[in-house]
Amino acid sequence: MYGGLAVGGKLRDTAARKSTTVGLASYVNEFEDSSTAQEFIFHGGVTIGRGIPIDFDHLKYLTCTIQSSDKVFVVHQGSKADLYDQSMFNSDLSAGSGSPSIVVFTGKGKVSLTSTPGGRPFESSVLAPFANVETVNLNSINGIVVAKSFDGGDSALHGRAFMPFGTCSTEKQWHSEGECKAWAEENSSSDCVDNWSSKKKQKKCQRYARKSKCFLDTKIGAVARKKCRKTCGVCT
């Protein structure tokens, strides 16, 4: 069972089971086919074809600026695909602090989540907006998963997220590993300008921002984020 789904691309069901139950409100941009839609039971309702109510660019900002703490474990996996279990993110924490609230992956290497040798589930949430995430022989994830793509297989996603979970770095301390290196270069304050300079185009940027079109999951939203970076708040 999933707590809730937010899928900006295409939702497909790869699990062997006949149906998947989703407990909370969900957003699905597109189903792979009609049979996929019938395999999901949305107890909290589902909004289809309107993108997701999440600013994904801001999640990339969070990934590249969040500081490590007893509740945040940052992994710079680069482009290497690897297998991860919960025990890998507890050894460096202070005694008695338990599992981190969230594990952050800054690279694009595939993230495969699995259970510990003792069968322990994955307890933390996962933030990996540049990476494809999957589960392998994993019964459940207690937190949430934010990823470029996610294949949960037969794993239950409980959606128990703890907020707030950390603080962000100053610009000089932004992560420069993984995909964050290119992101930091594109979003530094020295390069935080609108790409439309004429007064007429500037008015269009202001209109995009005023009508909350900057982060729509549409062609207009993509144009706004590219051309009106400062006005839309894409960079800082």
Image: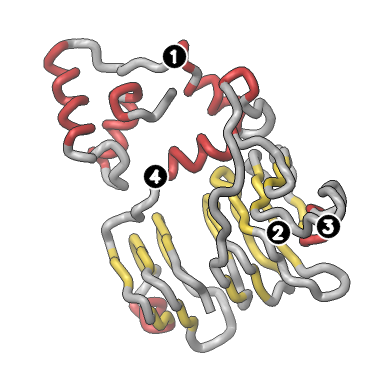
If you read the primary sequence from the N terminus, does the residue marked by circle 1 or circle 4 appear first? 4
- Label 2 – label 4 distance at C-alpha: 25 Å
Mark nearest the camera among 2 and 1 is 1
Q: Are dots 4 and 3 in contact, CB under 8 Å?
A: no
If you read the primary sequence from the N terminus, does the residue marked by circle 2 or circle 4 appear first? 4
- Label 3 – label 1 distance at C-alpha: 43 Å
How many residues crowd mark 2 within 10 Å: few (<14), some (14–19), many (20+)? many
User: Element type at marker 4?
Assistant: loop
Q: Give the residue pinned by disc 4.
A: 55
- Label 2 – label 1 distance at C-alpha: 35 Å
User: Element type at marker 2?
Assistant: strand
How many residues crowd mark 1 within 10 Å: few (<14), some (14–19), many (20+)? few
The label shown at residue 217 is none
Residue 21 lies, with reference to residue 219, above or below; the image says below
Mark nearest the camera among 2 and 4 is 4
Q: Are dots 1 and 4 in contact, CB under 8 Å?
A: no
Residue 192: give x, y in percent of width and height.
Answer: 40, 17
User: Element type at marker 3?
Assistant: loop
Q: Give the residue pinned by disc 1.
A: 191
Residue 166 lies, with reference to residue 229, above or below; the image says below
Q: Give the residue pinned by disc 3.
A: 96
Left or right: 58 in relation to 164: left
Q: Give the residue pinned by disc 2.
A: 112
Residue at screen point 71% across, 66% down: 122
Left or right: 173 in relation to 25: right
Left or right: 120 in relation to 200: right
Q: Residue furthest left?
A: 200
Task: Identify which amino acid the numbered label 3 is placed on.
Answer: Gly
Query: Quadrant of the image for the C terminus?
Result: top left
How many residues crowd mark 4 within 10 Å: few (<14), some (14–19), many (20+)? few
